Image (cartoon, rainbow, N blue to C red):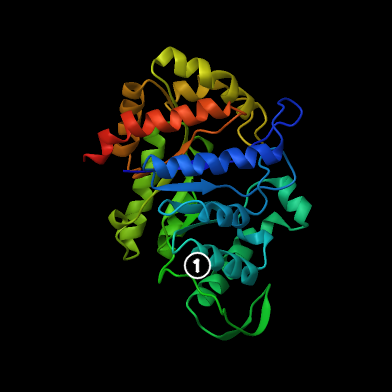
Amino acid sequence: MKFGLFTVFDNYANELPRTPGQFLEQVLEQTVLGEQYGYDAVWYAEHHFHQYGILTSPHMLMTAAAGITKRIRLGVSVVVLPFHDPVRVAEDYALVDYLSGGRLNMGLGSGYLPHEFGGFKIDPAIKPFLFNEKFDILKRLWSGERFTYKGEYHEYGEISLDVLPVQKQVPTWVAALRPQGVEYVAKMGEPIMGVAYVNSNSVAELKSIIDHYDKSSLAAGFDPAMLEKPIALHVHVAETTQEAVQNAYEPLNRYLRTRLYGKGAVYEDLAAREQLIVGSPADCIAEIKKYQDAGVNHLMCLMNFGGMEHEKVKSSIKLFAEEVMPAFRDQ
């Protein structure tokens, strides 16, 4: 089991005194702490036009993180491909890989928020076709190929990259946690990633989706056992169950109240569905084992949510690494 720190960058300017700049600095500090305590990766989300997520250009913050870390992998979760010129995506993230010494983790998605498609004036009905074409261009550029391209949505004269990724094969994931989506991604030979509570209502349901992905991968000639499956869950650990719940309760409800999907859910709903990793170290170990049994082998720990105080996030990062991660590292 691998462990990462995942930040959505949800900010609450009308509710909390934290400025966007302070928030970004806190996340960089948490990134350094994640490296110090042995986390495998950090993951930064891309969003636009709403407090839902204020990081519009993850590659910029990942470049800053590359300069203050040495080992931890730097992930984007995800680049929303339909919103971007694929050549610029290839250029920008190749540079992240170069500046980080080959530590880029590349998450890709087709987008799901109506206000973002409206802001970019893109018809969401064509997003899968845009994604496929842009992904094809990205992969060809990263291969070092020089080529011309004429597709339904893009046309380029001869193009190639001067700065290529350091990694021969950049680890790439596609966001998908619905049965039809995971089957399509499996046929592409790509690993899946996602947020557990968005597309499933229980550990058992998530397991059925992962099992479907594994079966589809094998049928397409790929070995799913060789692939990381990063899945995000809200995580907060404290010395006691009571303290952890007390710390997480209000921030999680703020997070859920301001989400642009899954509205109406509250803390108790996610707890009843076993879609929270909140509690003492022993509580967290027991819950993570359920997800490990379901096929999750990379837990993206969403610890910075709902405007939780920076010191409480840092305390959770430290205690989780010291008391929870060893139970899985020893395996």
Q: Is any atom of residue 109 visible in this view?
A: no
Residue lying farthest to the front in this orientation: 68
How many marks can you see? 1
Residue placed most toward the observer, 177 or 164: 164
Residue 24 percent location from the top left of the image: 63, 42
Give 123 or 280, whichever is nearer the viewer. 280
Residue visible at 40% across and 42% down in the picture: 36
For residue 151, what is the image quadrant?
bottom right
Q: Residues within 10 Å of mark 1 (few under 14, many from 20)?
A: some
Residue 22 versus residue 282 in the image, above or below: below
The answer to which image quadrant residue 129 occupies is bottom right
Please determine whether, in this image, residue 324 is positioned above or below residue 108.
Answer: above
| Picture residue at 67% right of the left edge, 63% below the top | 84
In which quadrant of the rendered image does the C terminus lie? Answer: top left
Residue 215 vs residue 98: left or right?
left
Q: Position of residue 244 (x, y in %)?
A: 46, 19
Q: Quadrant of the N terminus?
A: top left
Image coordinates of residue 271 in percent, x first then y, are: 46, 22
Q: Residue furthest top?
A: 242
Q: In this orientation, which residue lies closer to the viewer: 49 or 180? A: 49
Residue that carries the numbered disc 1 in the rendered image: 98
Please tell me whether mark 1 sits on a helix, a strand or a loop. Answer: helix
Residue 321 in view of the camera: yes
Residue at (63, 65) in percent of width and height: 130
Lateral position of residue 21 relative to residue 295, left or right: right
Relative height, residue 144 to residue 251 (above, below): below
In the displayed image of the protein, which residue is found farthest to the left?
331
> For this view, does 181 lie left or right of residue 326?
right
| Tag 1: amino acid | Tyr
Q: Residue at x 42, y 21 (%)?
A: 238
Q: Quadrant of residue 120?
A: bottom right
